[in-house]
Amino acid sequence: MSTIVVEELDDRVVVTLRRPEARNAINAAMVGELHEVCAALEERPRLLLLTGEGGTFAAGADIGELRQRGREQALQGINSRLFDRIARLPLPTVAAVDGYALGGGAELAYACDIRLASPSAVFGNPEPGLGILAAAGACWRLRELAGASVAKQVLLAGRRLDADDALRFGLVAEVVPAGDLLKRAHALLDRMARSGQLALRLTKLVADGGGHPLTDELAQAILFESEEKAERMDAFLAGGRS
């Protein structure tokens, strides 16, 4: 891996974006390496923590590469297909955002299930200033996460959301001092890891699908027949921890 650092643990994978010369801008090499991470997590589901090195999450997509792309590359959805794949990973994903998350970097953070931020975090989508649009998910994910009015302020008026704004609008779950950001993110993952893995997977599937009584009931039917459900409920009834 030349653009990311990957730490594999039993229950999670930690990915650190590392292109210090470009403030962790997302280029083709990083896209390819993140696809490799996704393939591994699809094969063996684990929690995912995404962060950036050097006080920046990701300052955007690589503009030098974008300048050379044309219609055919746009139709390939190079970044959007990666971010969609991250959003569809079986188990929850957390983005720990320190510093800038702009353009494609913001869209990568939006694709994660939960975001934590340091006080210096800044989210924004300045793509129209470069003559393009935020086509890797921001136009609809940000609307879902923060509401239509906020999304239009960011996408059309170039507003940048600082950490306090992001917390107020529900874009991030918590603002944590930079020195404690990864520790807090791991504590969040620890809490998730104590849940049943199949229950987490099906809950994410149902929630991402918009919810419907039929899908709720089918997912619950699967869980009601699982050994883990019986074991966890027996432990609870016996006075142990669930």
Image (cartoon, rainbow, N blue to C red):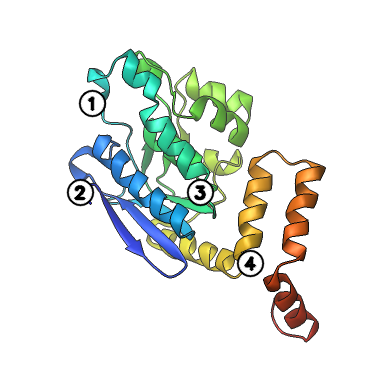
Up the image or down, 136 lies above or below 3; here it is above
Q: Nearer the viewer, residue 116 or 31?
A: 31
Q: Residue at x 55, y 32 (%)?
A: 141
Q: What amino acid is at disc 4? A: Gly
Secondary structure category for the residue under label 4: loop
**Residue position marked by numbered label 2 in the rendering:** 2
Up the image or down, 15 lies above or below 10; here it is above
Q: Residue at x 20, y 49 (%)?
A: 2
- In terms of sequence position, does the residue under pointer 2 or pointer 4 come before the other? 2
The location of residue 143, given as percent across then percent down, is 59, 29
Q: CA distance from mark 4 to mark 1?
A: 42 Å
Res 56 seen here: no
The crowd level at tag 3 (other Cα within 10 Å; few <14, some 14-19, many 20+) is many
Q: CA distance from mark 2 to mark 4?
A: 34 Å
**Residue position marked by numbered label 1 in the rendering:** 65
Secondary structure category for the residue under label 2: loop
**Residue position marked by numbered label 3 in the rendering:** 89
- In terms of sequence position, does the residue under pointer 3 or pointer 4 come before the other? 3
Please identify the quarter of the rendering in which residue 146 is found: top right
Q: Residue at x 71, y 78 (%)?
A: 231
**Residue position marked by numbered label 4 in the rendering:** 196
Q: Is residue 137 left or right of residue 150?
A: left
Image marks 1 and 2: residues in contact by CB distance under 8 Å: no
Up the image or down, 158 lies above or below 215; here it is above
Q: What amino acid is at disc 1? A: Glu
The crowd level at tag 4 (other Cα within 10 Å; few <14, some 14-19, many 20+) is some
Secondary structure category for the residue under label 1: helix
Q: CA distance from mark 3 to mark 2?
A: 23 Å
Which of labels 4 and 1 is toward the front?
A: 4
- In terms of sequence position, does the residue under pointer 1 or pointer 2 come before the other? 2
Q: What amino acid is at disc 2? A: Ser
